[in-house]
């Protein structure tokens, strides 16, 4: 249960995500890791979650080792707005008999932000989810709990959710992760182009019971939300990745 802080030097929150072309990392002591960018999905060897875009990788052909930016250069102790009394620190693995990720409800199997006091856990990419999303002229906010069901799965609960100000759009963080994992967890997505890996959302949009005149607008909002959430969960919430996801979410 090694603490993964001070990897380069202990840094402030603002400096912790500074990008370095090459870094050493204790989880891969054999070689230094280089910063690279890819449009293909990879498995992060830190948190064991899928990733894309900017990341650190071992340049040696004999190795297959990749880390999200969030996993390679972690923050020190940090406090999340939903748990202001907690101090989270990155560990190599979650301690035994601790909770699933507060955001998505899934068990951590690798790097995880852990609060020693309350035993809470957050996946590194879940910990970086934005509190506010702007989908055109509609704002959506991240909530720890919501009273209405997610419009993807039809259920309440399942951890954190995004909700639009007008309370018409609800989306579980867990359901956004499921869209990524449907093929990737079965091995078919590893190394594939993002657009061939995450399923098209036409079926999802058709589930929404909206008046015909509002359906197109509502679908646009859903796509913009997923565009940002999926980008962050994959470890790179940059405009370039968002643009790639946006192409995926366009109707055929």
Image (spheres, rainbow, N blue to C red):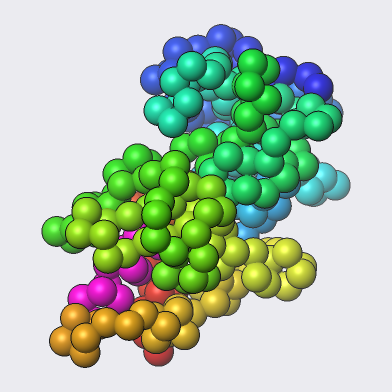
Q: Position of residue 137 (x, y in %)?
A: 14, 59
Give the quadrant of the N terminus: top right
Judge left or right: residue 27 versus residue 117: right
Main secondary structure along the magenta-highlighted residues: helix
Picture mark count:
0
In the foreground, 225 or 70: 225
Q: Is residue 153 magenta?
A: no
Q: Which residues are magenta?
A: 216-227
Where residue 124 sits, quadrant-wise, is top right
At 36% from the left edge and 80% from the top edge, which residue is drawn?
208
Foreground residue among 74 and 24: 74
- Residue 187 shown left or right of residue 116 in the figure: right
Q: Quadrant of the C terminus?
A: bottom left
Residue 23 in view of the camera = no
In the foreground, 240 or 206: 206
Residue 81 rendering spot, x and y as whole percentages: 40, 28
């Amino acid at each position: 249960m090694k603490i993964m802080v001070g990897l380069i030097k202990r840094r402030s929150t603002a400096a912790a995500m500074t990008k370095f072309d090459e870094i050493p990392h204790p989880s891969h002591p054999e070689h230094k890791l280089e910063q690279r960018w890819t449009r293909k999905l990879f498995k992060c060897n830190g948190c064991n979650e899928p990733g894309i875009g900017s990341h650190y990788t071992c340049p040696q052909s004999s190795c297959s080792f990749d880390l999200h930016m969030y996993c390679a250069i972690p923050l020190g102790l940090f406090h999340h707005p939903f748990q202001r009394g907690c101090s989270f620190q990155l560990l190599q693995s979650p301690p035994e008999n601790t909770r699933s990720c507060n955001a998505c409800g899934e068990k951590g199997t690798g790097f995880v932000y852990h609060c020693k006091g309350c035993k809470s856990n957050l996946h590194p990419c879940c910990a970086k989810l934005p509190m506010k999303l702007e989908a055109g002229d509609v704002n959506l906010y991240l909530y720890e709990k919501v009273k209405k069901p997610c419009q993807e799965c039809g259920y309440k609960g399942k951890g954190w959710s995004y909700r639009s100000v007008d309370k018409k759009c609800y989306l579980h963080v867990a359901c956004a992760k499921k869209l990524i994992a449907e093929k990737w967890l079965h091995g078919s997505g590893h190394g594939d182009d993002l657009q061939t890996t995450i399923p098209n959302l036409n079926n999802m949009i058709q589930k929404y019971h909206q008046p015909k005149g509002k359906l197109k607008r509502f679908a646009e909002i859903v796509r913009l939300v997923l565009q940002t959430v999926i980008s962050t969960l994959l470890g790179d919430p940059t405009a370039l990745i968002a643009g790639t996801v946006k192409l995926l979410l366009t109707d055929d």
